Amino acid sequence: MTSVRLPRGLVPLVVVSGVVLLVTWGLARGVWVSNLHNGLLALAFALVGAYVLLQRRAHRLGALFLGVGAVQAVLFWGRQVGHAGGDEWAAWLGVWPVALSIGLVTVSVVAFPDGRLPSPRWRPVVVVVVVVTAVCALLSLLWPVEYASTGVEVPHPFAGDPPAAVDAAWTVLAHPAYLVCQLLWPVALWARWRGTTGFVRRQLAWLLRGAVAAALVLVVGLVGWRSPTPGLIAATLVPVVAGLAVVHGQHAAAYAALTWMSRRSPAADDLPTDLARATSEALGAPVTLWLGSPAELRPVGVWPTSADDPLPLAPADLAGLVHRRVDLDGDRVGALTVERRELAPSESRVLDDLSAQAALVLQHLTLGELVERERRAGHLDVLTLREREVLELMAEGLSNAAICERLHLSVKTVEPAVSSVFAKLQLHQQPDTNRRVLAVLAYLRSVEGLASIHREE
């Protein structure tokens, strides 16, 4: 049975259209200043969530933002229509989802900026938040326990005054839970800050600036006008800044991924893992770099790391994975796989660029192994010690300048040695950007082939 795939961006578009419709409908009933912030928050969360999902379809934070926007739109519309002698069902819709909205916002803050929790220790916290907000929403759905605090004056469609036990449970559970949820916001951001570095901290800084600006407006409103309304309206700035931080972080992650090699040491053993990590951080999913033959691929770089490496696989098994083939001289030598269902166009371009860098990494590994093998076999005896040192560094992909720095030699000493290597090995440089490394690879492959023929004879 084949699954039906919806066109990309259809769900966010439908949700945003519904949010705009509800907010416009509500505003048509007049401007209720105390409720205006709910409409603005609905538009802000929905538009930001939709944009994030268009950039990355499976982004959890984008989905959470879209959900908050939808709930806020229902709240706004229901209160606009039913708060002053209007429809009781609309008023009911404008009250009971308050707990859902607070719960979704709390989970969104905890999961900012990548949709993941700061650490596994936060899972029980999120479970408790979900359970408590669900209970509060159920109580508000069945009884008018929250009507007085929201300014809704029409009767509840299901019940009159709540029973004493329900009212007591609401007093004990709901408002303390709302306060605790809001206290969790700075705690979660602080936990994320302590556990991250680099552009993730810059994303957090963006969000904190937006929150501080909204808090300052709230204080000014309370002091100057004795009203929280200016601060509530200014809170619209927070999801907008959060969305900008997420998108900025995606671009920063892509840039960091594409420049990972220039920011590291040239240690061969770390290259595959470094590339897998850079790719994983850019695409927000586990990544594996594979090396092998047309018959079997084995993992050489995995991120996030784990105690058990993935099992070897056949190239045919890549068909069901998001991956890029890695070729050298037209032959498959490996693959770069991403544990995602699909990628956005911008992410596909990043993966294309990183797969090209993966070819250099695998080339580096292959050349290092072959140089060591040929040196042990004595096939490089034609070269002097200095020339063999230069050849090994050429196999690592180092330029003449880098070889000079590594060996602490002048350019006048290294350049003749490079020329001598090619002259003694009778190699012609290829007219591409990696011609020196490719020439070394061609030589070592030819030597290995000749040795195999001699052994057969």
Image: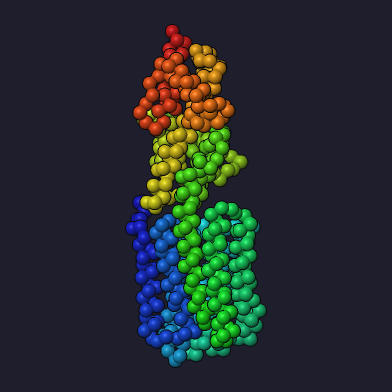
- Residue 20 point in image, percent of width and height: 37, 74
Q: Residue at x 55, y 40 (%)?
A: 264
Q: Residue at x 61, y 86 (%)?
A: 163
Figure check: 302 above or below 23: above
Q: How is the image coloured?
A: rainbow
Query: Can the viewer see residue 446 in this picture?
Result: no
- Residue 304 point in image, percent of width and height: 56, 45
Q: Residue at x 40, y 73 (%)?
A: 19
Q: Outermost residue toward the left? A: 7
Query: Can the viewer see residue 58 in this picture?
Result: yes
Q: Outermost residue toward the bottom? A: 85
Q: Residue at x 50, y 12 (%)?
A: 382
Q: Nearer the viewer, residue 292 or 231?
A: 231
Q: Quadrant of residue 66?
A: bottom left
- Residue 4 point in image, percent of width and height: 35, 55
- Residue 212 point in image, percent of width and height: 57, 70
Q: Quadrant of residue 324?
A: top left
Q: Left or right: 17 with respect to 282?
A: left
Figure check: 80 above or below 17: below
Q: Quadrant of residue 337?
A: top left
Q: Nearer the viewer, residue 397 or 268?
A: 397
Query: How many labels sit on residues?
Result: 0
Quadrant the C terminus occupies = top left
Q: Nearer the viewer, residue 385 or 129?
A: 385
